Each structure stands twice: as structure tokens, then as C-alpha cells.
Amino acid sequence: MSSFKGRYSYSVDNKGRVALPAKLRKSVSPAANDTFILTRGFEQCLFLYPQDEWMRLEESIRNLSPSNPQHRFFVRTLLQWSSDCQLDSQARITVPQDLLKFAGIDNEVLILGVLERIEIWNPRVYEEYMNNQPATYETVAEAVLKSNA
């Protein structure tokens, strides 16, 4: 089981390759075999799942009802953007052009560790997202942590 955390700034080369930070690589389960699935995330970011974490997500997706229109829409959207990727010899992944375009990524990325997945953002898009939250971190923390108690 992976447990990613932290914030890292990296560059994207002209072939769409992004290095995976060493601290995040150390958190990848051996079961992932340096294989990842990259897909569209929420709020214009990309989700990067190690293969073993993706298999857990896929299992929950398999339990969705094909007769429910929302379930079908979610599954189609998630999977049509999904791309298998392997770390190269320099610990980089190649991000497909359509995903770079979706996330508005040019030559810089912000990489976030978010428990079972890694998020890849255009730094400006992330800053705008954070600055446009309707509530403060403290207010949201109180509501979220209270509901989990």
C-alpha cells in the first residue's frame, strides 16, 4: 500500500516527460513494479496511480452499476483518459499530449503526494484553485475531521 505525501516542483521536457521525485518513488509498493496509470483527475489535474493502487480503484469501479447513467459516465470518462506508463531509466514518466493539454501543463509541474495517488498540476492552476476556495483550511478541517470522528 502506498502512502504519498509532500509537494514538489519539477519541469517537463519537450517530450512530455516528468521525473517522479525520489521521496515519492520510495513510497511506491514493490507490487506496483514501477508501473503506473495516469488519468484525468479533478479540478484540472492529473492522477497518477501505482499499478497496485489502480487495481484497487478498478475493483471498486467494477462494482458500479452499468445501468446507472452517472456510473457509466464516470467510468467512461476516467478510463478514456487512462494511460499505462512505466518509469524510464531516469525515473521519468511520459505524459500523453492530450493529458498535458487537459491539465494546461507546459514546462513546469507541481507534484503532490495524496495518499494512494500522486497529483500532477500546472502550478498556476493549482494556485488559482487554492486561492478560490470558499472556506478556509481550518473551517474545512473542522467539518471534515468532525464528520470522521
Image: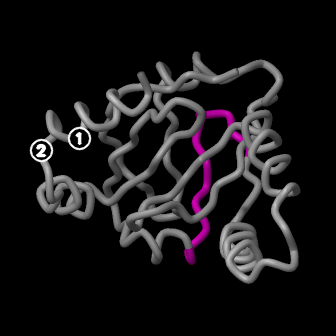
Q: Left or right: 97 with respect to 113? A: right
Label 1, residues with CA under 10 Å away: few <14, some 14-19, many ≥20: few
Q: Residues within 10 Å of mark 2 (few under 14, many from 20)?
A: few
Residue 91 vs residue 23: left or right?
right
Name the residue at the bottom extreme. Answer: 69
Q: Quadrant of the C terminus?
A: top left
The answer to which of 62 and 42 lies nearer the viewer is 62
Residue 77 screen position, x and y as percent: 67, 75
Which is nearer the eye, 114 or 18? 114
Identified at 67% across, 34% down, the residue is: 89
In the visual, does 104 lie left or right of 141?
right
Q: Which residues are magenta?
A: 86-98
Seen in the picture, residue 104 relative to 10 is either above or below; the reply is below
Question: Amino acid type of disc 2?
Answer: Thr
Classify 63 as above or below 140.
below
- Which quarter of the picture shows residue 71? bottom right
Q: Position of residue 24 (x, y in %)?
A: 51, 25
Q: Residue at x 36, y 72 (%)?
A: 104
| Magenta-span inclusion, residue 29 | no
Inspect the magenta stretch and tell me whether residue 97 lies in it: yes
Q: Secondary structure at mark 1?
A: helix
The numbered dot on residue 140 is 1
Q: Which residue is mark 2?
A: 136
Residue 137, horizontal then vertical, whole percent: 17, 38
Classify mark 2: helix, strand or loop. Answer: loop
Quadrant where the N terminus is found in the figure: top right
